[in-house]
Amino acid sequence: MLLDAIDHVQLAMPPGGEELATWFYEGILGVPRVPKPPHLAVRGGCWFERGSLRIHLGVQDDFVPATKAHPAFTVLDLDRLEATITTNGLAVRRVDDPLEPDVLYVDDPFGNRIELRPTRGTEDKADYAEVVEDVARTAVGDRLADELAFVHELDRLKTVLRQSFVGEASRRENTAEHSWHVAVMAAVLSEHLEADVDLARVVLLLLVHDIVEIDAGDTGIYDDTSNGSKEEREEAAADRLYGLLPDDVGARLRDAWEEYEHGTTPEARAARVFDRLAPVLLNLSAGGIAWRRWGVSADRVREVVAPIGAGAPELGRFVDAALERAVADGLLPAGSSGLILP
């Protein structure tokens, strides 16, 4: 099979460099630090990810900085990033090439060479989004312009990677794919729900509830550390994102998001059935790869999928049988501890 993309960039650092790495890659370059899977976290190092941009730093005892081989990243506003870098006391080097005067280099805190260059064409596309809003505002009015600004923002869901892998295990799914998948699942499998529900409302909740991941990212359900800040991060994201819309539309979608989060209506409980079912199906298809990454057992998975049986007993029986099969086939450990490593 031919190569089609870079999955991540791997760099080395000396032992104990995690905080320095976080200061540089998250604080200066703006790529959030994300938790490493437990079976990899014990080795030290740290990961920084935003959408398809993934930078992993591993610990190397006999560390030597990479001063020649290096990653090159594109930047939306190179001058602004250069100012941020220099303000933080780091030196940047402009390339000595008249054909590429805007390319610059900086060393990370460990001496690894990093190349930064302008994004090809992205600035024009970003500017044109503003043109679309201006045209809508002039031709129709502020309401349509605000709605289109929100629709443009939704496109970023396609770059937010979730913890689940697609069924063939070749890559992680993105949030837009997940939202579409669970909405269609609801349309197909709603006959198995125990309660009578407004299916259109269930679909709306499934399409709306993960929009906050544009700002907050996907917090893995087994990620106990990040779940501690999940509510605060997602509340802030909801304030900004739904605030882009006209007040009445924003309030309607914000109410739907709150309804799902609180789980107090039959429709919200039904939506959770399909939101919990989708990752189980993907894990079964992908050989349990996400379960292995997080080192979870069948007991832990059963706790997480409890809303499936509560809202759809037939689907609950299926999931229970599927987990028993996964244990028998070695995809999951049966007990409450232990890792299955690839």
Image (cartoon, rainbow, N blue to C red):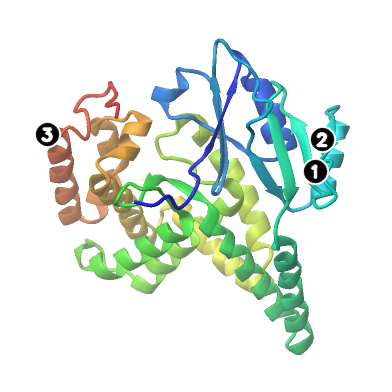
- Is 132 placed above or below 29 here? below
Quadrant for residue 271, please give it: bottom left
Q: N-terminal of the two: label 2 or label 3?
A: 2
Query: Mark 3 or mark 1: which is in front?
Result: 1
Q: Number of labelled discs?
A: 3
Q: N-terminal of the two: label 3 or label 1?
A: 1
Q: Check disc 2 and give the amino acid type.
A: Ile
Q: Which residue is mark 3?
A: 328
Circle 2/circle 1 CB separation < 8 Å: yes
Is disc 2 placed on a helix, strand or loop? helix
Q: Residues within 10 Å of mark 2 (few under 14, many from 20)?
A: some
Which residue is more in the foreground, 90 or 66? 66
Q: Could you say which disc has been placed on residue 81 in the image?
A: 1
Is disc 3 placed on a helix, strand or loop? helix
Quadrant for residue 65, please give it: top right
Q: Which residue is mark 2?
A: 85
Query: Mark 2 or mark 3: which is in front?
Result: 2
- Is 326 placed above or below 57 here? below
What distance separates the C-alpha of mark 3 from that of mark 1?
52 Å
Circle 2/circle 3 CB separation < 8 Å: no
Q: Residues within 10 Å of mark 1 (few under 14, many from 20)?
A: some
Which residue is depicted at the point 64% across and 25% down? 66
